[in-house]
Structure formats: C-alpha cells, structure tokens
Amino acid sequence: MNRVDYLVIADTKDFTSDYITIELRKRERCYLRINRDKFSEYSIQWDIFNEKMIIEIEKERYYIDSQLKGVYYRAPVYLRFYSQNSYEEQLYKSQWMAFVKNLICFENAVWINNPVDTYKAENKMLQLKYAKELGFTLPKTLVVNSYCNNIDINKKYAIKSIDTLLLRNDEEECFLYTNIVSGKELKSASLSMAPVVVQELINPKVDLRITVIGDIVYAVKIVKDGEGINQDWRKEKDDVKFEVINLPDEISEKCIKLVRKLGLRYGAIDMAVSNGKYYFIEINPTGEWAWLVESSGLKIYKDIVNTLEKNKEGVMEF
C-alpha cells in the first residue's frame, strides 16, 4: 500500500497542478493526485474516527492518515450549476464538493488553500472591507440593482458581477468580463433582476497581477505595446506582455497581510496603478498562475511546494 504525504486535488485538465505534481516527483515525495472529474472511478473508504482513508485507483491502493503533511487544492468552492444540468450531474457535483470540503478533517496538514477559507475569501465585498482596513487605496464601489444618486450620469464606471458569472448558451459557455459603461447608460439600464458591482473607472491605468505565497511576493505589470490597457485586459490576453516588476515594500507588506487575514497561504491579487497610486481591485484565492511561469519565468511552483513542506509553525520538515 502506498503512503501519501502530499495530496493534490485537481481536475484532469488542470495544467497548473501539473507543475506541483512534477515538482513533488522531482523531490521524491510521496504524493497522490486525485481529479474531481474522476472521483466516481475511484474506490474510497474513509474511517473518520480513526482518521484513515484508503483510495484505490486502477488497482493501486493509497493510504492517508492524520500524518498527511500537505494538501494542494486550487478550485473555486462556490457551486455554479447550469440550469441544464441533470439531477445526476447536480448530485455528483454537490456531494463530491462536500467530500472535498470535509477533507479539512486532516487539520495537521498545510493547506493551499483550505476550502473553508477559500469559500470566505471568494466574497468580493469582504475582500474590499479587509483591504480598506489594511490601508489599501480602493476605487469607490457600490453594489446596486437600480440607478442611484451616487452615480453621475456624466462619468464612466467599471461594471462587474459580484461573483464569477458563467452562463451557458446551448453548448457554448459564456463568461462575463468587466465592462465600461457611462452613468447615463446605467440610469436607463434594467438592473432589478440581479445586483451588480459599480466601481469608479480608473483611467489611465496599468494592471498588476501580484502573486503571494506565504511571505513571498511576485508582481508583474500587464502591458500592450508598452502601455497599460484601459479595458479588461483579458479581452486582449493574446496580445499582452507580463513584465516582472518590484513593488514598493509598503504594498508588498499589505498584500501579505491581506492573504493572511483571509486565512490563505496563496492569493492572486489584481491591482492597478494610476498616477502613482496603487489601487486594490480584488484577490482570487484560486487564481491561475501557470501563465506566469511560462510568460515571465517565475518559479511559483517551487515556492508552493516549499510552503507545503513546512509544518504549521513554518519549519521545513525535510
């Protein structure tokens, strides 16, 4: 039977997690990767009171107990169901998600990130509240489902959903980007069906992606032809460059404190620089980072595995 010291919870096509498993293999660690889209193909026995779990995959048996050292889990915790999902699909997703969340019973392990803390950290308004308490500069923000007097018809605003919005149009998945609209458009828009986030438009700006792993901070600026992009840069992601930069110490320290305050060990923070001011936009506790390895040469996977190898007091166990 194979003993498991490190557990990686992913999906079959989660190439970001590939970096983690490759690094664990290079270090000759005893690890197991389980993919959420394959759970029903595994045989799992979990003895809760004795804190022992046996997972059988393709006739190989793996053993997990309270000595599990680290868990890498990079996936949203909110359940986002399409209305077309069958009862079987809904059952599969909801109950296996509950299974993953209950793995926090392995409390001695170092989690990146614990799904309960991820669930809390995914709330954008809480992120903004904590960021304000830590002294970040924030764009003025409203959550509304109707036009209000605080919106100026002569100004432009950045409009986004409160939670990541994935919709399905027949067989096509649709993702909602941040959009720029005028206050005049908002006044005439029908918003009553669902609330939206309305933020003052930061323009001109340069977007930053800041990756925090424990007390390590990486930052890149996102530019096209050497300039910032005033709309959502993801609409032009094939044409942008990610240039490594050094942040002011004050900003780096605030980023580290925010990740800790949310109970996380990893966080992907979006900020924007405009006229010398650093604006906090949001933090994603499950944010993608593989593209930073490929585009900017940042060895993020090494720092994640280093963190997994530390005990809860931050001491390396090897």
Image (cartoon, rainbow, N blue to C red):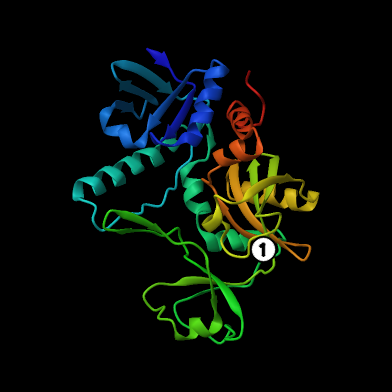
In this view of the protein, can residue 72 be seen by the observer? no
User: Residue 85, relative to residue 45: is it above or below?
Assistant: below
Spot occupied by residue 200 in the image (x, y as percentages of width and height): 62, 73
Q: Residue at x 54, y 15 (%)?
A: 28
Looking at the picture, tell me which residue is in the foreground, 103 or 161: 161
Q: Is the residue marked by circle 1 packed among few (<14), some (14-19), or many (20+) residues within 10 Å?
A: few
**Picture quadrant where residue 280 is located:** bottom right
Q: Residue furthest top?
A: 1
For this view, does 146 lie left or right of residue 169?
right
* Figure quadrant of residue 130: bottom right
Question: Which of 94/84 is in front?
Answer: 84
Q: Is residue 237 visible?
A: yes
Question: Which residue in the structure is indicated by mark 1?
Answer: 132
Q: Is residue 169 above or below residue 144?
A: above
Q: Position of residue 302 (x, y in %)?
A: 62, 29
Q: Is residue 281 left or right of residue 164?
A: right
- Give residue 190's position: percent from left, percent from top: 40, 81
Q: Secondary structure at mark 1?
A: helix
